[in-house]
Every structure is written in C-alpha cells, then in structure tokens.
Image (cartoon, rainbow, N blue to C red):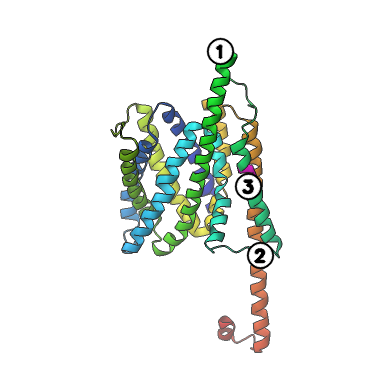
C-alpha cells in the first residue's frame, strides 16, 4: 500500500500547486519565469537531502548519465511545465488536470512505438488496451472541441450588451482551444518523461540526487528560454508575498518531493502504475477550483473527463490481465520443463536451474 499512499499524497499536493500557480498567472507573471524559480527552489531544497541521504550509495556520474538527466529534465520538467502553465493560463485548473489523465494512455502509446510494450490482439488484455486507448482519445477530442454549457452558476453580466458578451465568449473559446492543444502537447512530454525514468532509474537509482540534478538542468534551460522568448520581460524579478510563497511551495513540494516520489514509484511499480493516479489530481483540483477560485465547470469537461478516466482504467485492466496471463504461461512452461527432465523433487539445485 505504500506506493498507493505516496501517489495519492503527490496528486493532492500537485492539485494545490496548480491552484496557486493559476492565481499568480492571473497576476501576469511569465510562465517561464515561474519554471525558473520553481526548479531553482527545487534543486536548492533537494541538494542537502541528496548529499547526506545518498552519499554512500550514489554511483559515479558519467557523461551518459548526465545526458539522460539533461534530456529527461528538458522533456519532463522544462517543456512539460511550460506547456502546462500556458494551458493553465488559458483554461482552468480543473480542465488542465483533466488532460493529465491522458498521461497513462500516452505512456502506453509511446511504449508501444518504442517497443517497450507489446499488444496481443488475440487476448482479452490486448483488446482491452486498444479499446481503452481509443476511448481516451475520443475523450481528449471532446475536451478540445466541445466546451459545453456551464454546470455552475455564471458570474453576473449586468451592464454588458449582447454584442459585448458574444465578443468575450468568442475570445474565450479561442483561448480555450489554444489551451487544450498546448495541454495535449504537454501531456505527451510528461509521458515521455515516465519512459525516460525507467532507464534513468536503472543507471542512476538515486531519487533525490537525480531529481536535484534534473531540477538544476531545468532551471538553466528555462532561464535560457525566458531570455529568448520573453525579451521584453527579461528581468528575473517576482513581487508580492503570495507569489513568492507560492513559488517556494511549488518548487520544494511540487517539483521537489513530488518528483522524487514519482521516481520512486516508477522504480517500484512501473511507469503505467505511477501515471494511473493522475485522475485523483483532477478530483482534488475540482474541489479547490470550485470552493476557492469559484471557477465554472462545463459539461464538455465532465463528459470528456469521464471518457478519459474510463478508457484509462480499461487500459490498466487490460495490462493487468495480460500480466496475469503471462505469469500463468511461465508457470506452465516451468512445470513442463520439470516433467520432461524427470528430476526428483529432492534435487533443489536442478529445480532452481529450471
């Protein structure tokens, strides 16, 4: 149960991070500047922990390991956070978290493309994985193309003409579409990070040290991108106590402890198990969004989220089914090898070799 508790705690913490970041984005702070501060705080927070906790077990850093960590930070931290913050700014915290439910399916699709996962269409598990993927894709398209009517009471619109409301709604729809597309790209980036972590975990199995190094790389990458993209606002200055405290929390918890926990869960249970808990982030974010930010929840978001979550768990059921079938086949093969060899049951050394 330890990985389950860890993933639930991580998603609760990340939901809180998203609410805080939505607030400071509304104040006009640059997305890349948020990533710079968040990752810098994360690396500083993890540095003493990584040094004292893993100094005896930490393997030597090689050029290959640093390259993997650099690419992993670029895909899973810098680009993922930047795209997610753009989407969060254009939509809402709940809607943005709904897209994160695509991460397990995207992880499965990328794993199949890179031959890290196999699909057997002759088995129930293989069929379930394909069906679950298609259901998730349809839910994603629904989220992008259909916003729907608000399910919560809209704010007052007194004093606005019909023409003014139509202009505002058209502008909002355009932002919503752009945010949806950007969030989809960010989800694929994060899925690629899960696959990268399987390799990183094998060559450098130190969660605190690897996360600290990736956070440091991400801070540098974000700073360079900030200077290139936001030339007019190239100053690295954040004002206001709320913004500063939010970035400290986002860096130490959101990009520090949460990524350490996810890296540990990937090592313990695999990337698909770790990604399977992302729906809980949406649930927690919806509670915070409704009661704290008073954001509207739309019909398209609810229906699309239900389809994505349903498809995701169909996929995970299929994966579990295939894993059990694989265990049964291996057991049968061992028994057949045992009977063919005619080895006495007392010969334990020979049985272990089988």
Q: Which mark is residue 36?
A: none
User: Viewed as shown, does residue 166 lie left or right of 121?
Assistant: left
Disc 3 and disc 1: Cα gap in Å?
39 Å
Say whether marks 3 and 1 touch (CB < 8 Å): no
25, above or below 75, in the image: above
Looking at the rendering, which quadrant does residue 38 occupy? Answer: top left
The answer to which of 198 and 52 lies nearer the viewer is: 198
Q: Which residue is identified by label 2? A: 120
The CA span between labels 2 and 3 is: 19 Å
Mark seen at residue 160:
1
Instruction: Tell me if 208 is positioned left or right of 13 in this view.
Output: left
Q: Position of residue 107 (x, y in %)?
A: 54, 54
Q: Is residue 71 magenta?
A: no
Q: Which residue shows up at 29% across the image and 34% down it? A: 234
Q: Residues within 10 Å of mark 1 (few under 14, many from 20)?
A: few
Which residues, given as a range, are shown in magenta? 136-140
Horizontal side of residue 169 vs 45, given as left or right: right
Residue 273 drawn at (x, y percent): 56, 54
Residue for point 47% across, 40% down = 84
- Location of residue 101 in the rendering, given as x and y in whole percent from the top left corner: 57, 45
Q: Is residue 289 above or below residue 210?
A: above
Q: Quadrant of the C terminus?
A: bottom right
- Occupied quadrant, residue 209: bottom left
């Amino acid at each position: 149960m330890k990985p389950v508790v860890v993933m639930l705690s991580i998603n609760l913490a990340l939901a809180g991070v998203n609410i805080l970041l939505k607030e400071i984005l509304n104040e006009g702070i640059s997305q890349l500047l948020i990533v710079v501060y968040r990752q810098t705080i994360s690396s500083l927070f993890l540095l003493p922990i990584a040094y004292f906790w893993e100094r005896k077990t930490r393997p030597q850093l090689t050029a290959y390991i640093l390259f993997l960590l650099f690419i992993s930070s670029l895909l899973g931290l810098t680009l993922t956070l930047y795209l997610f913050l753009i989407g969060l700014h254009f939509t809402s915290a709940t809607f943005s978290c709904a897209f994160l439910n695509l991460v397990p399916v995207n992880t499965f699709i990328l794993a199949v493309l890179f031959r890290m996962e196999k699909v057997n269409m002759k088995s129930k598990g293989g069929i379930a994985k394909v069906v679950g993927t298609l259901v998730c894709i349809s839910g994603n398209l629904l989220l992008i193309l259909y916003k729907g009517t608000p399910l919560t009471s809209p704010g007052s619109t007194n004093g606005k003409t019909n023409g003014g409301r139509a202009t505002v709604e058209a502008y909002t729809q355009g932002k919503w579409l752009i945010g949806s597309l950007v969030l989809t790209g960010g989800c694929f980036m994060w899925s690629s990070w899960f696959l990268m972590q399987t390799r990183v975990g094998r060559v450098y199995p130190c969660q605190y040290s690897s996360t600290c190094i990736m956070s440091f790389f991400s801070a540098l990458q974000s700073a360079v991108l900030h200077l290139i993209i936001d030339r007019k606002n190239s100053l690295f200055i954040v004002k206001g106590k709320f913004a500063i405290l939010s970035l400290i929390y986002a860096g130490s918890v959101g990009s520090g402890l949460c990524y350490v926990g996810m890296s540990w869960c990937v090592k313990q249970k695999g990337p698909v198990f770790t990604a399977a808990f992302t729906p809980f982030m949406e649930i927690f974010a919806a509670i915070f969004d409704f009661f704290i930010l008073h954001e509207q929840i739309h019909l398209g978001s609810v229906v699309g989220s239900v389809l994505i979550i349903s498809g995701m768990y169909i996929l995970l059921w299929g994966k579990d089914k295939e894993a059990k079938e694989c265990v049964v086949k291996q057991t049968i093969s061992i028994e057949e090898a045992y009977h063919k060899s005619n080895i006495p049951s007392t010969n334990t050394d020979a049985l272990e070799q089988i």
